[in-house]
Each structure stands twice: as C-alpha cells, then as structure tokens.
Amino acid sequence: MTESTKRPDTVRLQRIAKGFWESAAFMSAVELGVFTAIANGSNTIESAAAALKIEPVNAERLLTVLTAMELITRNDEQFSNTADVDRFLVEGKPTYAGPWMLFSKPRWETWGNLTEHLKVPAAEQRVLGMYDDTFTVERAREYHEATYSIGMGAARRFHRQVDLSGRTKIMDLGGGSGCYCIIGAQQHPGLRAEVLDLPPVVVVTREYLKDNGVENEVIATACDFTRDALPQDADVAIMASNLPQYSRPIIADVVQRVYNALLPGGEFHLIGEMLDADGCGPIAPALWGLSEAVSHSTGLAHSVSDCADYFTAAGFKQIQIDEFIPDTLTRISGTKPD
Ligand SMILES: C[S@@+](CC[C@H](N)C(=O)[O-])C[C@H]1O[C@@H](n2cnc3c(N)ncnc32)[C@H](O)[C@@H]1O
C-alpha cells in the first residue's frame, strides 16, 4: 500500500495529544541538569541518578524518554548528548541556552486552559497583552534572563548578515536585553544605540548594558512603541521577536511610524516569527500567534506577505526578505529613500 492509499490510523494524533508530556520531560531534564551531568561523565542510570539526586528508577524513566526523543543517544549502559544538546544545554558553556528552553514554562498552567482563552471576546483583549500592569521589574528580569541566553547568538548572526559600518545610530524597538545594540556597539566604534522598551524592562536593559561595558554607547529609554514618539536621529531601526504580539493594523502603524522617524537613507530590519506567504506554516510562528490568545492581546501570526505589504505601504524601498532562523524567524528589511 502506498502512503496515500494507506488507511489512516491514530498514531500521529496520539503523539500530538501527548506532546505536553514530551515538553515536560525536556524541561525537567533542563531543570535537573541532566545534560550537564552527562557531559560531566555521570552518564549511566546509576551515576546520573546520584548526580541529579533522584531515584535510579526515575533516572531510568527520564533517560529512556530523552533517548526516544533523540536528545541523547544510548550505547549499552552509557548515554551521550547529541550535538545540539551538547552545544546549548550544558551549563557553563557560553552557548548555554537553558533559560530560553524554560521561557514558556511560567505559562504552563495557562496553556492548559487554552479553550477558555479562545472563548474570550474581542472586547476583553488588551493592546499590551501579557505586558500589562502585572509585568514588573522582577518579572522582566526573569524574562530577559531567558531572552538574553538566546538573543546574544541571534544578535551575532544579525551583525554577520548586516554590515552597519558607516551608520551612526540604531533605535531598537522592544530591544529587551539590548543584545542587538550591545553587539552593534562592540563591533562598530562610534555607533550609538537606543533601546526602546516598556518602563519595567529598561531597568533590566541598563543592567545588561553595564555588564557588557556599553553603557556609554547605548542608552535605554522607556517607550511603548505602539503609541509613543520614536527618536528622530537614527539611521537604523531594528525590531526583533515581538511581531505576533500585535494585530495587523498596529504593526502596519508601527512600520509607518518607524519610516517617518528614520533619517533619509536609513534602514529598517524587522525580525519576526513570520508565516510563509501561503499562511500554512511553519509551526513555530503559528504557535507564537496562538500564544497571544493566552495573553488576551490582539496579536496573531503575520505572514511574510503581510509584512512586505506593511513595508510597501509605509514607503520603504529595496524591500528584501531573508531567512533568519530556519522555520522560526524571518528578517524583512527596507530602506527609506534619501
Ligand atoms: C521576546 S522579547 C525580544 C527582545 C529583543 N528584541 C530580542 O530579540 O532579544 C520582546 C520585547 O518586546 C518588548 N515590547 C513588547 N511590546 C512593546 C511595546 N509596545 N513597546 C516597547 N517594547 C515592547 C518587550 O518588553 C520585550 O522586551
């Protein structure tokens, strides 16, 4: 029987239904430090159990699932990390991204009530969604520990792709930890930058700027980019990883206001979780859009064609679409004519 004539079964559906079991196993492995223990030589059930301070039977249960998920491999009694796990989930390495893997965990219970969230009427949606009054400095600090652990790598990738030599000032909308500006300032002497973010966040941004020794080159300013004025002296604008948090009219308006604020000849890079032009995937941007139902915002997943339309309508020229992180982030850029 060929694939197309095969009688449908429930295998795929059952795996999806239990997907949250896999997430739980993975997050517990990160929290317990399983991958770090394996890298440090505690790579059998008994030795891992001792290092993690859990019962051997629980170590066996967990290592068996992690092996089936192809996060670790098994050779007789010994387990090893796969290449991506070894690079990103062993504590102590500069590439450690454990906090980012746990980023969505605070919302675990809320996702369990997704059906109720999907029934929330439009009248109860808020523009700022999760960034309402409950988003305190403490919450922002925890949140950006996670974004920083993945964002510095993304920022390095951005500056490998985009040469900002000769530019004078970046404005970074929703810049969070400031990672894109930190790397920019470190790589381009004389380049200044302004991170624009919500009031609780800029307190945390300033901590990262200081830790990275760029507090003289990069400033952080409290700004709600959906309604506050943007700086008028930047020739580069960046907006990364907050696209699905807002509706189509809001993003179209932000793109227009960035265009208006940029100096002539300036460039705008919008790095976002974008769907393909047909709107059928990939899954990661689609899920980021769905997560806005949980936040009670007006946001949703935008497609690359939606974004190209915002750029064209605003007046940008030389509009270009580039893959940034496969199946996750796309970079759309445009230039304001002289
Ligand atoms: C997922 S983080 C991304 C941070 C950073 N751009 C990066 O790529 O690492 C999203 C950021 O957008 C900020 N943000 C969301 N809505 C905003 C708004 N209306 N005005 C200013 N900042 C906003 C959040 O506070 C948060 O710092």
Image (tube, rainbow, N blue to C red):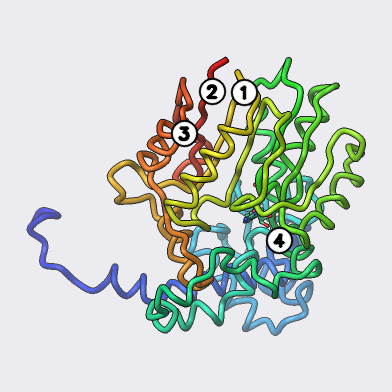
Please tell me how crowded label 3 is: few (under 14), some (14-19), or many (20+) other residues with Cα within 10 Å.
Answer: some
- Determine the CA span between mark 2 and mark 1: 6 Å
Measured as percent of width and height from the top left, residue 141 is found at: 79, 63
- Determine the CA span between mark 4 and mark 1: 35 Å
Q: Mark 3, mark 1: which one is toward the viewer? A: 3
Instruction: Tell me whether the residue at label 3 lies in contact with that at label 1, contact meaning CB atoms closer than 8 angstroms.
Output: no
Residue 223 higher or lower than 15, as above or below = above
Quadrant where the N terminus sits is: bottom left
Amino acid type for the residue under numbered disc 4: Pro
Residue at point 70% right, 36% down? 171
Q: Which mark is residue 266?
A: 1
Is residue 87 at all visible to an observer of this figure? no
From the viewer's side, name the closer residue of 23 and 237. Answer: 237
Question: Does mark 4's beta carbon lie closer than 8 Å to ligand 1?
Answer: no
Quadrant where the C terminus sits is: top right
Q: Secondary structure at mark 4?
A: helix
Amino acid type for the residue under numbered disc 2: Thr
Residue 37 higher or lower than 4, as above or below = below
Residue at point 71% right, 29% down? 234
